Image: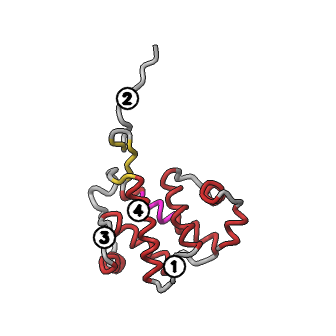
Amino acid sequence: MTVTDTRPAPGTDTGVTLYSRAQVRTAIDDGESMAAEQARISPYADRFAWAVSAVMTLLDKPGAPWAEVKNRHYTATPDATPADDDEPQYTRDQVSQAVNNGVDLAAEHERRTYPDDVDNLVVNAALTLLDDPEADFDQVAVECYSESPRVVRSWL
């Protein structure tokens, strides 16, 4: 007879995977780095810095106005991380909303008419890396776009 352990795994709530703020920050940072490398844009470009600030702001406060994103962006990084930084607390849907809305909001406030293919890659890479931190660009291209990495790279 096989006995199945039905207890939720650590970082889950009744079987729903939860992510910490630190995991989300790592995924968005790595996603923007991947997009920057593939598009041959500096990873220090404003488009990425603002996107990360917007995502992290909206993660904690969905629907936050741009003024709060600006405050977070211009506030010096604290020496100590928040006590709950590593505590799993966000569902994948919450993270997806924050990443999508944050990247869109940053594009809008950078005076771009709409998010472009680089922004789209940031979103897809970040969400893929959230689920699989070892994923690479080839995996993102195939899983998210059903295209070869060469084709996806040509869009950037």
**Tag 2: residue type?**
Thr
User: Which residue bears the numbered disc 2?
Assistant: 6
The residue drawn where x is 42% and y is 75% is: 105
> Crowding at label 2, few (<14), some or many (≥20) Cα neighbours within 10 Å?
few
**Tag 4: residue type?**
Gln
User: Which residue bears the numbered disc 4?
Assistant: 97
Q: Quadrant of residue 81?
A: bottom left
**Tag 3: residue type?**
Pro
Gap in angstroms between the C-alphas marked 3 and 1? 32 Å
User: Which residue bears the numbered disc 1?
Assistant: 114
Tag 2–tag 4 contact (CB < 8 Å): no
Image quarter hosting the C terminus:
bottom right
**Tag 1: residue type?**
Tyr
Q: Which residues are magenta?
A: 24-30
Mark sitting on residue 96: none
The residue drawn where x is 38% and y is 37% is: 9
Dot 4 or dot 1: first in sequence order is 4
Q: Quadrant of residue 13?
A: top left
User: Which residue bears the numbered disc 3?
Assistant: 78
Q: Is residue 28 magenta?
A: yes
Under circle 4, the secondary element is helix
The residue drawn where x is 60% and y is 57% is: 144
Q: Nearer the viewer, mark 3 or mark 4?
A: 4
Q: Quadrant of residue 52?
A: bottom left
Q: How many marks?
A: 4
Gap in angstroms between the C-alphas marked 1 and 2? 45 Å
Q: Residue furthest left?
A: 83
Dot 1 or dot 2: first in sequence order is 2
Dot 2 or dot 3: first in sequence order is 2
